[in-house]
Amino acid sequence: MKVAVWLIVLAWFVLVIVPIIVLFAFSFFTTEQFRTVYTPTTTTWVELFSSGRWEVTLRTLRIAMTVTLIELAVGFPFALWLAKGRVGKVGRAVCLAMLTIPFFLDVSSRTIVWRAILGQSGLVNTVLMGLGLTDAPLDWLLYSEVAVLFGMVVTLFPPMVMPIYLAISLIDDTLLEASNDLGASPWQTLSRVIIPLSLPGVMAGIVFSLGPALAAWVEPGMLGGGFVNLISNSIESAYSALRYPVVAALSAFVILLLLLMLGAMYLIARRFGDPASSFRVLRG
Amino acid sequence: MENRIAFARVAPISPKLEISHAPVWKRLGKWGGFAMLGLIYFPLLWLILLSISRNPLGGIPGDFSLEHYRALFANSEWHMPMLASLVIGVIVGLICAVAATIIGRALPALNSPGKVLFLFVIPLFVPGMSMGAALLIFTRAVLGLKLGFWSVALGHFVWAFPFALLIILVVTTRFDHRLVEAGRDLGASNWRVFWDIEFPILMPGIVSSALFGFLMSFNEVMRSIFLRGTTETMPVWSWVQAAAQQSQVPIIFSLASIVLLITLPLLCAAFWLLFVKLDKS
């Protein structure tokens, strides 16, 4: 049995860790006439930002961060209510199941329906015009940055809520009672007890929604209508041109952006309290 | 004593403490989340309604008919991708269940389970596109292999396994090891202890992890795009059709509705089994 365990660990290492290392290594190669040149240079990285992709990167960052902030603003209070509000056992189980089920559903078929809802003759425009709020259908609802943003906010809600819920539900109720008994206002309990203790969950939630948002591909494809180019579209076009080093550099760039954001988050989190201490709870 | 009463008057302590004494915030949190859940599930309902409408591209359901389902069944183009997805899904589900059971049983007994668990959940932190690209470069450019079913299955396995493992851990961490000791004391062999005692207790977790592995694989698009070579899976086929021509969209609506109507009850059953039935026993 031990042998099987270590075989799986080894296989996993080869299948997951090695490809990620290779990905980073490949970003330092170049392509000439559809062939990869295996001499380490930084040309691919330099070209990455000179060929007008800077704009694409900024747009991706802007959309991804907006999405993450919206998720956090809606997700944190919801997770707090779900974990510590007076929710019945059944109600909580139903909410959790409803949050988990979308992980197992096809993103593209869920997203393509928004075309029918947000389109010129779609539900939203029909209702708006029926109510006389607008004379002509709103055309910025679909095939626009707003549509892409909206689609991502809907898809990435469960990945934000789940880890925050887990972290908050691990907080002992007696800590909250103690805080209250010592005369803390609800706001003080929230900012000094709940938020510092839920930081690992919040950070995991940010990774789980920021990562997919930075690499989002279904939403810009389905709801952007070719008008909203994100990093993923650059990766795809480099892939069809067989320019593997560019694919590698862009993919590695997404991972690096994610790590950078996480590092920044960690530094901000340190101002609230000691984030490492909350990991200790998980370890113990 | 007087001080205490004065304090109580200033800041009344509720009988059972809740996060916020200001109900506005509580209500905002609750309804904000419900609104999001609504936005997640409303398109699914709309999808099914549109799939039985005569003109789904019009955007408003109505004039119900099953003509797109008839068109779907008359069309055979989706059979191969569907078969490919089913086969890959079954393989990924089975491997996930077996591997997750082995690791899930061993993990709680390790000295530093946290580190090993982290190793296994790394794919959750890497965006799907980056992971697909990493596997593509590793298999295609470094190893020089020809992509096909196996590479799609590989990509799906890497994606599905963390979920399968987390599900198995729900049952293995609750498992009472005294049962195994009792079995041994009564003279059962290791294999018999596993088969007669451990396996039946872990069964719901194993079945769920296989099911979830299957579903993760069946619905996966982003990694498949990179790793498919020339094979087409079901979601990739729908994706290509939807992107290429609007006239195919009604059929895709019907197909997605069928998949949804099969998937949702399966998921609900798995959740019920894992979290309601197990909690009672």
Image (cartoon, grey):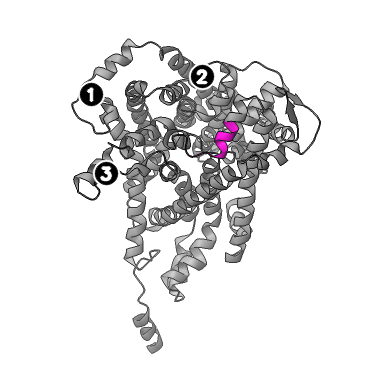
> How busy is the neighbourhood of tag 2: few (under 14 within 10 Å), some, or many (20 plus)?
many
- Amino acid type for the residue under numbered disc 2: Ile
Q: In the image as oriented, which residue stretches furthest toward the right?
A: A39
| Number of numbered discs on residues | 3
For image coordinates 35% across by 45% down, the residue present is: B37
Q: In the image as oriented, which residue stretches furthest toward the front?
A: A136
Task: Say the numbered circle drawn on residue A136.
Answer: 3
Give the Cα separation between the discs numbered 2 and 3: 47 Å
Towards the viewer: B112 or A270: A270
> How busy is the neighbourhood of tag 3: few (under 14 within 10 Å), some, or many (20 plus)?
few
Does label 1 lie on the same chain as label 2?
Answer: yes
Residue pointed to by mark 2: B88
Towards the viewer: B20 or A44: A44
What chain is tagged by disc 2?
B
Residue pointed to by mark 1: B54
For image coordinates 33% across by 49% down, the residue present is: B34
- Residue B15 is situated, as x and y percent measured from the top left of the image, at 34, 69
Looking at the rendered image, the quarter that the N terminus of chain B falls into is bottom left
For image coordinates 63% across by 44% down, the residue present is: B114
Asked if the residues shown at circle 2 and circle 1 are in contact, with their CB atoms under 8 angstroms apart, the answer is no
Residue B185, can we see it?
A: no
**What is the span of residues highlighted in magenta in the rendered image?**
A228-236
- Amino acid type for the residue under numbered disc 3: Ala
Give the mark toward the camera: 1 or 3.
3
Give the mark toward the camera: 2 or 1.
1
Left or right side of A281 for A7? right
What chain is tagged by disc 3?
A
Looking at the rendered image, the quarter that the C terminus of chain B falls into is top left
